[in-house]
């Protein structure tokens, strides 16, 4: 003979008991171990899961920590060690978990220019930006974070190249290369070029103004197709021309060190003179006394072929 069970009892049998969430004391203890007051977290109920996430960092290799740091919006060095990354990734994860008032206090503690209108995204950007500046990447001036991370990948690839490869790459793009260039100098020039290649037109124009490069008298090809497409083509042409002018500035220090009065001759004439002297030095390497430094004077190069 079957026994009928009450509906409430049947329901209890079908549904297993739900696990209880952490109590207030457990959350307080977790926050204390993390190192922040529980009320400073954006989601206090997630304090235990955050603690477990932070504990798990110890078991991750350097490559995984670098990727975690990147997910948080920060830029790591080209070859950071696990010991270098651990405190940085921990801070990044913790900062992401803070409530806006606590995040605001943190930024003020870092002497960052916080305003009353700053939201979570702008506050995090202030904290992320120094890591990008350290890699030479102007995060705010790029069109998107995707572009910034792509640029960072290119910079990491540069760091793995040999000195000869770096010099070859510089020459291909028209960047200055000394007779015995240092690795740091070559990397710096290529880093600047990669950034210039990714900057939008208005940012490139600002860069030119800052370096004293003229932005006028740019010859552009005639527009084609529809107006909107023509505008895009024209802007791209102008941006590429301005990048070429910026590339020319990398030669300034070399020309001035050689005794060339760049300010008087201008960059075009200075480049021609320098190239001509370099070719002469190559031909006369057995008689270096024939190449006089005073030949760099502007008057001596009015008719260089006849003089020589």
Image (cartoon, rainbow, N blue to C red):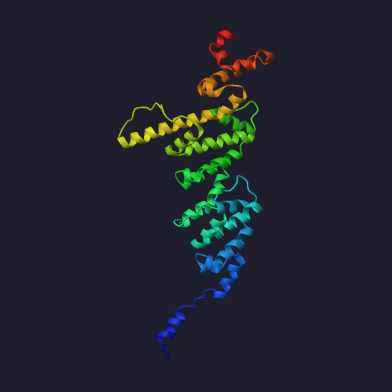
- Furthest residue toward bottom: 1
The residue that appears at 61% across and 62% down in the rendered structure is 55
The residue that appears at 51% across and 38% down in the rendered structure is 195
Quadrant holding the C terminus = top right
- Quarter-of-image position of residue 25: bottom right
Q: Which one is in front, 25 or 214?
A: 214
- Furthest residue toward top: 306
* 180 horizontally vs 234: left or right: right
Residue 219 in the image: state x and y as whole percent.
39, 26
How many tags in the picture? 0
The residue that appears at 55% across and 75% down in the rendered structure is 24
* 197 horizontally vs 280: left or right: left
Q: In the rendered image of this protein, does residue 291 appear above or below residue 135?
A: above
- Furthest residue toward left: 226
Please indicate, yes or no, whether residue 39 appears anywhere in the rendered image. Answer: yes
Residue 264 in the image: state x and y as whole percent.
53, 21
Residue 279 in the image: state x and y as whole percent.
60, 17
- Quarter-of-image position of residue 23: bottom right
Quadrant holding the N terminus = bottom left
Residue 144 in the image: state x and y as whole percent.
45, 46
Please indicate, yes or no, whether residue 98 appears anywhere in the rendered image. Answer: no
Q: In the rendered image of this protein, does residue 2 appear above or below residue 64?
A: below
Q: Which one is in front, 93 or 118?
A: 118
């Amino acid at each position: 003979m079957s026994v009928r069970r009450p509906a409430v009892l049947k329901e209890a049998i079908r549904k297993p008991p739900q696990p209880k969430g952490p109590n207030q004391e457990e959350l307080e203890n977790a926050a204390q171990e993390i190192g922040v007051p529980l009320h400073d977290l954006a989601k206090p109920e997630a304090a235990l899961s955050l603690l477990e996430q932070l504990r798990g960092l110890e078991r991750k290799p350097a490559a995984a920590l670098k990727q975690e740091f990147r997910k948080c919006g920060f830029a790591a060095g080209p070859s950071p060690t696990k010991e270098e990354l651990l405190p940085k990734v921990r801070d990044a994860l913790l900062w992401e978990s803070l409530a806006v008032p606590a995040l605001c206090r943190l930024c003020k503690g870092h002497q960052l220019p916080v305003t009353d209108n700053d939201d979570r995204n702008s506050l995090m950007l202030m904290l992320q930006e120094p890591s990008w500046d350290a890699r030479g990447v102007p995060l705010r001036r790029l069109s998107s974070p995707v572009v910034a991370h792509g640029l960072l990948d290119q910079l990491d690839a540069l760091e793995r190249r040999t000195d000869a490869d770096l010099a070859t790459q510089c020459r291909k793009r028209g960047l200055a290369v000394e007779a015995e260039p240092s690795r740091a100098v070559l990397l710096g020039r290529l880093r600047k070029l990669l950034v210039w290649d990714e900057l939008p037109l208005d940012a490139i124009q600002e860069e030119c103004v800052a370096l004293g490069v003229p932005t006028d008298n740019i010859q552009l090809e005639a527009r084609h197709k529809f107006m909107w497409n023509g505008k895009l083509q024209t802007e791209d042409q102008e941006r590429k021309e301005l990048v070429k002018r910026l590339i020319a500035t990398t030669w300034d220090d070399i020309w001035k060190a050689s005794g060339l009065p760049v300010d008087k001759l201008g960059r075009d004439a200075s480049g021609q003179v320098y190239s001509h002297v370099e070719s002469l030095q190559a031909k006369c390497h057995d008689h270096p006394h024939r190449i006089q430094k005073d030949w760099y004077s502007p008057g001596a190069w009015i008719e260089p072929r006849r003089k020589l």
